[in-house]
Image (cartoon, rainbow, N blue to C red):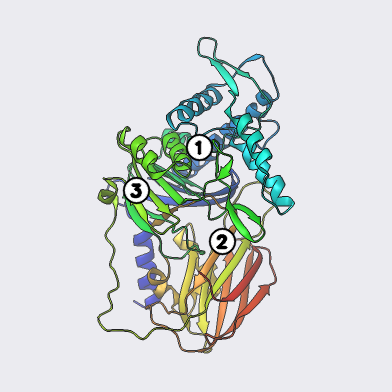
């Protein structure tokens, strides 16, 4: 058997790990862009393709249904219609009532660290950032005073909510996790036996599925940078909040978009907080709250709640975890230096930024994408990313697939790990090449070509290529022309964190 057939067999064994002779079970993987303002990864454990399609449809339908209720960004959502009322009891849906009740609960339990009206302070900072200045003390004090008022009252007997003031309110602190949980339940009801829903880094696991979860290092810049931790989870929700993908730039300084409602100041001491909980709303709410609270406050609140674990990454470099966090970690090999090494000069690496083209569809499946590096002889030295859904369509990535490149698949990219991270914009990805081949050895200085290939199942196709001089000395930047699948791409060869 030649190497392509051997690797293809390996690929199918990785992609279809739950087969048995009596009732073949397959994990189907789907990727969609622009779902709740970010990206969706969906894994469904079913026995037939038809069941997988049915469960996928159920997930998307439930996301759309609840978004039409809870969205603060759609003027036609139930929440937006309710927020335009004042002083009048309004009968609302069970979902909106539930979320408002949860906000009341978490506002009390976190001592005000989680508040739907934090949007008031966010807008204050956004307006100041447009003028490239920090908000004044008077502006911040006004925001705090506004946020401290009650914003609604709930009547549990008549199931009504009365909107009380004009404070800007958004439910995004944990609405994404809340919706993800119901979407996962919808998949199970539609016939899936196991489901993973990952919307922008907030992950829900339900049923007969166990997943490796990589926690993004908040100090990393690229999708393929090493994670800060690796976990194994089942029947849990994990959510991560952090300031490293969004925020405000003022006078060249970065300020977190996560605001402390008690002070109207950006939360700066915590780079990221990750929470594991049995239910999605708790994980999402506390991931946000723990980014605002002190570590001591977070530890005390977490200790009062059963089956809850967390990891905090502090700005000073420390990592703090709950007592049982280590029981969920997957052991990883650590590189050990056995001989003194000469101090290396600061080196250059390459950041590859790419943005997927948006189709004439508010939500669309991500195309198959391969990003890799070839040397001057066109030999593939490193696969940086390989994103696909069905292994049988990998040959559609014609350039990547040929010449036995598939043999390096397992070395160049991780097929089995999903990622918990702060939310990022849909369709936008950053990859890093550190100048090493698939074996982890530094390449020799010289000419190398970066290739970005994208294809849809029986659809459009695009290939980008850019030659660079990898000499470790001369920084360079390149902008690549877009195509039908990749709207734009850029290469930045230089010194990066």
Residue neighbourhood size for the residue with mark 2, other residues' Cα within 10 Å, grouped as few (<14), some (14–19), many (≥20): some
Could you tell me how many numbered marks the image carries?
3
Q: Based on the displayed image, in which of its 4 quarters is residue 206 positioned? A: top left
Which label's residue is closer to the chain start, 2 or 1?
1
For the residues bearing labels 2 and 1, Cβ distance under 8 angstroms: no
Which labelled disc corresponds to residue 429? 2
Image spot of residue 492 (x, y percent): 60, 74
Q: Give the residue at x 67% y 48%.
A: 361
Which labelled disc corresponds to residue 25? 3
Q: Give the residue at x 28% y 78%.
A: 337
Q: 62 above or below 412? A: above
Question: In the rendered image, which quarter contains the N terminus?
Answer: bottom left
- Which residue, as the protein is rendered here, is positioned at the far right? 131
Residue neighbourhood size for the residue with mark 1, other residues' Cα within 10 Å, grouped as few (<14), some (14–19), many (≥20): many
Residue 257 seen from this side: yes
Local secondary structure at mark 2:
strand
Which label lies toward us, 3 or 2?
2
Local secondary structure at mark 3:
loop
Q: 361 above or below 427? A: above
Image spot of residue 485 (x, y percent): 64, 63
Image spot of residue 48 (x, y percent): 41, 46
Query: CA–CA distance between discs 2 and 1?
Result: 24 Å
Q: Depth check: 358 or 223 in front?
A: 223
For the residues bearing labels 1 and 3, Cβ distance under 8 angstroms: no
Local secondary structure at mark 1:
loop
Which label's residue is closer to the chain start, 1 or 3?
3
Q: 2 above or below 151? A: below
Residue neighbourhood size for the residue with mark 3, other residues' Cα within 10 Å, grouped as few (<14), some (14–19), many (≥20): some
Query: CA–CA distance between discs 3 and 2?
Result: 32 Å
Q: Which residue is mark 1?
A: 174
Which label lies toward us, 1 or 3?
1
Q: Based on the displayed image, in which of its 4 quarters is residue 452 positioned? A: bottom right
């Amino acid at each position: 058997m030649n190497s392509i057939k051997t690797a293809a067999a390996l690929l199918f064994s990785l992609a279809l790990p739950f087969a048995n002779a009596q009732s073949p079970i397959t994990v189907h993987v789907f990727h969609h862009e622009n779902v709740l303002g970010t990206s969706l990864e969906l894994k469904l454990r079913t026995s037939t393709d038809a069941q997988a399609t049915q469960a996928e449809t159920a997930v998307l339908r439930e996301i759309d249904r609840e978004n039409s209720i809870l969205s603060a960004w759609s003027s036609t959502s139930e929440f937006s219609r309710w927020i335009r009322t004042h002083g009048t009891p309004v009968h609302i849906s069970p979902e909106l009532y539930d979320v408002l009740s949860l906000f009341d609960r978490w506002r009390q339990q976190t001592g005000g660290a989680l508040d739907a009206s934090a949007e008031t302070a966010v807008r204050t900072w956004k307006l100041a950032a447009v003028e490239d200045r920090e908000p004044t003390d008077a502006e911040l004090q006004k925001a705090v005073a506004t946020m401290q008022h009650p914003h609604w009252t709930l009547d549990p007997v008549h199931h009504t909510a009365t909107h009380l003031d004009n404070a800007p309110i958004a439910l995004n602190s944990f609405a994404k996790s809340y919706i993800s949980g119901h979407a996962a339940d919808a998949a199970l009801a539609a016939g899936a036996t196991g489901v993973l829903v990952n919307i922008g880094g907030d992950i829900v696991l339900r049923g007969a599925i166990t997943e490796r979860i990589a926690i993004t290092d908040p100090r990393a810049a690229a999708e393929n940078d090493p994670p800060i931790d690796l976990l194994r989870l089942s029947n849990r929700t994990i959510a991560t909040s952090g300031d490293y993908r969004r925020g405000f730039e003022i006078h060249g300084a970065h300020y977190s978009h996560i605001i402390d409602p008690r002070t109207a100041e950006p939360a700066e001491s915590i780079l990221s907080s990750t929470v594991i909980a049995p239910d999605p709303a708790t994980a999402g709410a506390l991931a946000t709250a723990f980014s605002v609270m002190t570590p001591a406050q977070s530890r005390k609140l977490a200790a009062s709640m059963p089956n809850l674990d967390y990891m905090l990454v502090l700005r000073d470099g420390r990592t703090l975890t709950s007592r049982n966090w280590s029981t969920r970690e997957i052991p990883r090999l650590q590189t050990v230096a056995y001989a003194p090494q000469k101090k290396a000069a600061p080196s250059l690496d390459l950041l590859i930024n790419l943005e997927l083209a948006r189709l004439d569809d508010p939500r669309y499946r991500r195309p198959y994408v391969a990003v890799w590096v070839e040397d001057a002889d066109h030999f593939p030295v490193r696969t940086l990313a390989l994103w696909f859904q069905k292994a049988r369509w990998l040959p559609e990535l014609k350039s990547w697939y040929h010449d036995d490149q598939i043999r390096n698949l397992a070395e160049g990219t991780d097929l089995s790990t999903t990622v918990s991270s702060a939310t990022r914009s849909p369709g936008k990805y950053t990859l890093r090449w550190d100048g090493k081949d698939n074996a982890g050895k530094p390449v020799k200085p010289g000419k190398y070509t970066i290739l970005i290939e994208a294809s849809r199942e029986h659809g459009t196709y695009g290939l980008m290529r850019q030659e660079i001089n990898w000499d470790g000395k001369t920084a360079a930047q390149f902008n690549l022309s877009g195509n039908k699948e990749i709207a734009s791409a850029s290469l930045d060869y230089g010194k990066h964190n």
